[in-house]
Amino acid sequence: MKEVDRVDGPRSVAQVWTFIGATFFLVALLVSAILVPDLRILHFFQALIYVAVIVLARRNSPWGYGAGFAIAIVWNAMSLYVTHLFEVGAVAFWSLLRTGHILQIVPMMVTLGGIGHFILIVATLFAILRYNSSARKWWKFVGGSLVAVAYFALIVSFAHPH
């Protein structure tokens, strides 16, 4: 008899947090695309990753959890250690709280997206650890991770403004 994965209890909480983390990032992509027209094509294709993560998480798929986990790790690593826009946005948020004036909204969106990614990392790990299925879940999780990162690399190479 095939084991059925129920969507209740702790797993449904992980699905809700996966949705919240992905939605934070989608909002950041949307605002950035509105403010920087050169990013619209890239952000459109990047948003497809998060839509897929939401749809697959709703279906309790290890592919979706892997994709959400990996893209969040890669993107946050780039924002923290390569571009440093996460820190610039955090400073801009702090300035907004102190002065009430928005100085740099695009870096603030990078920070918002990074926060969404931290939520996504924890939620997807929690979901996959609670996933009650065969050992094949890890192959699917890794597969989702590889597909998401490969797709991201592809769209950045073709759609990134020069």
Image (tube, helix red, strand yellow):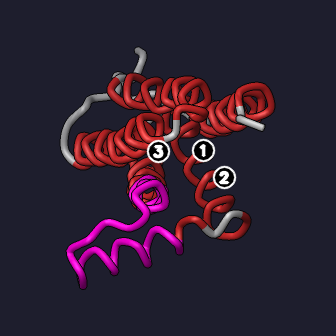
Question: Marks 2 and 1: CB-CB under 8 Å?
Answer: yes
Whether residue 44 can be seen here: yes
Q: Say which label, 3 or 1, has the lower sequence index.
A: 1
Q: Which residue is mark 2?
A: 74
User: Of the residues shown, which amino acid type is indicated by label 3?
Assistant: Ile
Badge 2 or badge 3: first in the primary sequence: 2
Label 3 CA crowd tier, 10 Å (few <14, some 14–19, many 20+): many
Q: Position of residue 142 (x, y in %)?
A: 68, 39
Above or below, comparing residue 74 to residue 80 in the picture = above
Q: CA distance from mark 3 to mark 1?
A: 15 Å
Residue occupying the point 43% across, 58% down: 122
Secondary structure at numbered mark 2: helix
- Residue drawn at x 80%, y 32% as measured from the top left: 157
Residue 136 visible: no
63 sits left or right of 112 in the view? right
Residue on which disc 3 sits: 128
Residue 46 placed where, x, y %?
Answer: 56, 31
Measured along the vertical axis of the image, is residue 43 above or below residue 114? above
Which portion, as a residue range, is magenta? 87-114
Q: Residues within 10 Å of mark 2 (few under 14, many from 20)?
A: some
Residue in the image at 33% along x and 80% along y = 95
Identify the residue at horizontal 24%, vertical 81% (top origin).
99
- Secondary structure beneath dot 1 equals helix
Q: Residue 92 occupies which quadrant of the picture?
A: bottom left
Instruction: Quote the CA–CA distance across marks 2 and 3.
Output: 19 Å
Q: In the picture provided, is 136 more to the left or to the right than 146?
A: left
Q: Is residue 106 magenta?
A: yes
Quarter of the N terminus within the rendering: top left
Identify the residue position indicated by label 1 in the image: 71
Mark 1 closeness class: few <14, some 14–19, many ≥20 residues within 10 Å: many
